Image (cartoon, coloured by chain):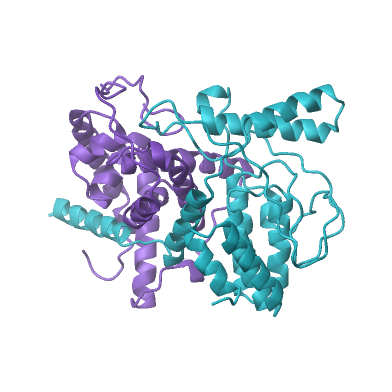
Chain colours: A purple, B cyan
Amino acid sequence: MSSASGWPDPNSSERTPASAPAAAPTPSPADPQRLDDLVQTEVDFVWRVLRRVGLSRPDADDAAQQVFLVASRRLPELAAGKERSFLYGTALRIAANLRRGLRRRRESPEEDLPEQREPSEEQPDELLERRRARAFLDELLAQLPEELRRVLVLAEIEQLTLAAIAELEHIPPGTAASRLRRAREAFRRLLQAEEHRNPFQRGEP
Amino acid sequence: MKGDRLDALAERLFQAARDERPDAALQRRVREQGAGELARGDAPPASGARSATRKARRGGAAPWLATAAVLSAAAAAFLFLGERTLQREPEVHISAEARSPAKSPARAPEAASPSSLPAQPSEPRQAPAPSVEPSPHEALPHTPATPAKRPRAQSAAPATTAPVQSAPRMPLADQLALLKQARALLRSGQSAEAIAVLDRYGAQGGTDLRDEALLLRIEALAAQGQSAAAAELARHFASKHPDSPLAERARRLGGLR
């Protein structure tokens, strides 16, 4: 089971790696170019992670800004090669806090404003179909246990390797493989039960 | 086969998620925010807030000051010592004020001159982290456990200036919401309303995004035709942060380029 925040619970029955590496990697300086490169390479990944844990587009924008603000402050201490892991963990924690705050205020989810949608050459009905598909996907993902949902998102949407997933989730590769297998099975069962709500109305996939 | 059909449906759903991208403006905002942070090199309050707490409790200060000082100290402790310092996990809080017009808090009288600039609160240098590789469990943005009680408003300050910042530090989520509101007002041609929101940002203790707030103010002043005020703010920003990538944008918005 994961902790209330969604981050892997170190007390989980599943094996977790040692809490600290044998040799700490060398930190890199607070180089503006380094931060710029980090933003360029990781902002889409961070934003999509925030979206798939249930944040609306506006909330994902805000949360992404918070994530990179934290990163910019921690940049001098952040070891090269560990940036994505840090960003991922920070994003999950910020999203968890934000969702708790939203639930407490009982706000209704913000609708995507037309001006916030990414400009596209797609026809409006194609855009609407994709939007419905993502909404349907999010409904299915929300029914998965959080640790299974995370690995499924990392594997199927971000298309990361098991090794990369294991690093982000701070679990052994074997645990990552096991979770992914269970996540796929659970997702398939959910999809089978909800297949009649197929958002792709025009023809079968 | 049904299994193939389900697999194909799942793949289409995942592909729709892969294709989703944030608005291009987000990357620009994140870059500018980060660049401003690095150029400024400031650190959020730590010991200053704690000493304010002790003074407030000793000296019979107004109750709101004690509350604000306690919340500032708690938030600073959370930010720099990790969440284990606090018994309850702070929550991200987007206050009602941030999403709708609110009473601006009590402020010291503001100079009416367009050349008055937002006062920048002093912030102690950030303490070095104990470990090289920061844990994802620490260092979340400032989020007090309970909403800070804000002092009641005086009459609105002149639209061209920002009030002196003496309010407790605003949660980052609220700061983002206010700047988003200001940006939207500016884009819709309501520059005076945008400046009023930016005044509120400064008055309510907005500090983390003050560079972006200042750039928005410069743009709003220019949109109002107050080119002299916009240029002066832009010149001031560029002189304070000559190496910042934002300085060039400030000069451009202020009509200096």
Quadrant location, the C terminus of chain B: bottom right
State whether residue B185 appears in this view.
no
Quadrant location, the N terminus of chain B: bottom left
Q: Residue at x 56, y 30 (%)?
A: B78
Q: Closer to the camera, B181 or B19?
A: B181
Which picture quadrant has residue B47? top right
Determine whether A157 is above or below A70 in the image. below
Please state the horizontal and vertical placement of residue A94, each as a whole percent of the image: 48, 41
Please state the horizontal and vertical placement of residue A168, each as a whole percent of the image: 29, 37
Please state the horizontal and vertical placement of residue B93, each as a whole percent of the image: 61, 43
Q: Closer to the camera, A95 or B12?
A: A95
Please state the horizontal and vertical placement of residue A127, each as a whole percent of the image: 37, 70
Which picture quadrant has residue B8? bottom left
Determine whether B66 is above or below B197 in the image. above
Q: Residue at x 68, y 67 (%)?
A: B194
Determine whether B152 is above or below B240 in the image. above
